[in-house]
Amino acid sequence: MAVRARGRGALTRFFAAQIVLTLFVFVMLLNSAAIMVWVERKVAALLQQRLGPYLVGPKGLLQPLADVVKLMFKEELRPKAADAFLFGLAPIISATCAFAAFAVVPFGASTTFFGLLDEPLRLQVADVNVAVLVIFAVASMSVYGIVLAGWSSNSKYSLLGGLRASAQMISYELSYGLALASVLLLGNSLSLTDIVGRQAGTWLGFIPRWLVFVQPIGFLIFMTAGVAETNRAPFDFPEAEQELVAGYHTEYSSMSFAMFFLAEYINMVTVSAVATDLFLGGWHGPFLPESFGWIWFLLKVSAILFFYVWMRWTLPRYRYDQLMQFGWKILLPLATVNLLVTAAGVLYFGL
Amino acid sequence: MPTLDHYLLLSAVLFAIGAAGVFVRRNLITILLSVEIMLNAVNLTFVAFGRALGTVDGQIIVFFVMTVAAAEAAVGLAIVIGLFRHRESLNPDSFAQLKW
Amino acid sequence: MTLFYVFAAIAVVASLLVIAQRNPIYSVLLLIASFGALSGLYVLLSAPFVAVIQIVVYAGAIMVLFLFVVMLLNAPHEETEADERRHVLLRSGALRFGAVLAFALAAELVWALSQGRDTGAFPGASVASVAAIGRTLFTDYAFPFEVTSILILVALVGAVVLAQRDHPLDRERP
């Protein structure tokens, strides 16, 4: 990002803006996790025809705050035979990878913040050419948090739970990557900003140029693989194992446990944000000027997150072997065929 | 500024460390890890030379080396699993005899 | 320049610890750290695609495989009690010879490199775009690409067959 030497004032303002942007994204992600806790419980309640949290604050809006305070005051336990270093490292890896993936996701058009800055600043913490690959790489690294959590708990059940969860994540990464590749064929670039830019405007005056209309199956594959990657229902067998035997985070309590669930919610937000950028046109939308595009982005991400919660409380859970069979025998061939058809389309119809 | 010599020296050091691991360690998995270190050192050499010569061929060779390393790691670990099941030991000295 | 030294130091120290660690789990994790440092070095060499692929393939897939195997095998330690108390170079037989060989190799490599002429700094910054890599890969290197796909298939089948629990031919026949 070239900053022409227009005096020290411009440079320091640019760096200050970058730091403010980074902090803003971090704080907003934390808030989004808290809001998601409330949304999950409220929507679950409404779907099950009951009230949900309503005591703490108006309409139960302060419930996440109460949950956080409760978790902070719980005792931090550690099994004696557990490997202390790995036991502490595992939730850190999970949480860090969850935040790091969002660093390359753009969430609004370039803006000068009403003339405060000399040059427009992209609403993206790190503007890299290979943004899509970075997201994929960070998703690969987040497997380690789960594997190490399972191993370091020094319990056979935790270990098997951790290995199963990570096997599930690795299996669905393939379909995730192939769905991404189909979008890359159409978007012709690895940079998320370029792909979003391609989705501006409309066809026939009212159908937006979103990639979901060109790649409907790709979108479905991406969302399914995304749900499986984040270990959410109906693919949340690793979490449900707690009801049956033990999961990879049974031995964790208090803030370490909170970090795992923070990581899960932020992974959900990241998958939704990436899906919005790739398939739903990012921050482009009617009626609003470009600089307020982040409002559209928020609305689209919220819609996808609502579907996430809706799916969890509506669909029954897959059994582990059904889950793996689905990932390898159905989703992966479908993603491959989708890629081939997209490639043929690009070649012969010049999409 | 780091020159080509810096990168070549670094990859030579890494290669020597990997080779030392293969020679010295008596644990099959650590030997495989040392082989991976050696392959990575070679990758670094390829990319450094590709940059110095201004071509993209270095990166493409790295692509192939990574693929071969993945295949070799998979098959190597499968063999290690088979060996462990038979002899309950990961020490290569336990397999010194030709008898199975 | 400092960034190069930081990444190089991390890579070398992590690799040394990999071969010095007794616990294989720590070896695998340290190797992942080394791969991360190498990925940083690739970024410094204007190869962002290779850097990301290193993380995705090596650190994200191959090392997970190693970690799975180490965790499931849960193998006991390798050295005898007497050997563990002595330094690697002072141990008996093969280990001493191996350590000497390793030093000889290191010395040889450093000598060979110091014989070369000074190559100077790298030519002007050129970020090889992913499009250029793809173009060259699918035109000049199309044949190795196809052969690699067959290699992966062979490795897949081989790994599954080699790790099978009971060989179909070993089962009792009525």
Image: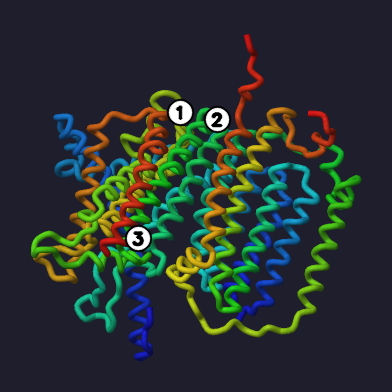
Q: Quadrant of residue A85?
A: top right
Residue at x-position 17% and y-position 37%: A54
For marks 3 and 2, the one nearer the N-term is 2
Q: Is residue A330 visible?
A: yes
The amino acid on which the numbered mark 1 sits, given as a three-letter code, is: Ala
Query: Are the residues flagged by discs 2 and 1 in contact, CB closer than 8 Å?
Result: yes
Residue at x-position 30% and y-position 72%: A122
Callout 1 crowding tier (Cα within 10 Å): few <14, some 14–19, many ≥20:
many
Q: Quadrant of residue A130?
A: bottom left
For marks 3 and 1, the one nearer the N-term is 3
For marks 2 and 1, the one nearer the N-term is 2
Rendering coords of residue B75 (x, y %): 63, 42
Observer-nearest of A55 and C82? C82
- Mark 1 sits on what residue? A246
Rendering coords of residue A274 (x, y %): 31, 56
- Mark 3 sits on what residue? A184
Q: Is residue C58 visible?
A: no
Please, which chain is the residue tagged with disc 3 on? A
Please, which chain is the residue tagged with disc 1 on? A
Q: Secondary structure at mark 1?
A: loop
Q: Secondary structure at mark 3?
A: helix
Observer-nearest of A182 and A145? A182
Q: CA distance from mark 3 to mark 1?
A: 40 Å
Residue at x-position 65% and y-position 68%: B45
Rendering coords of residue A112 (x, y %): 24, 77
Disc ID at residue A155: 2
Q: Is residue A32 above or below residue B90?
A: below
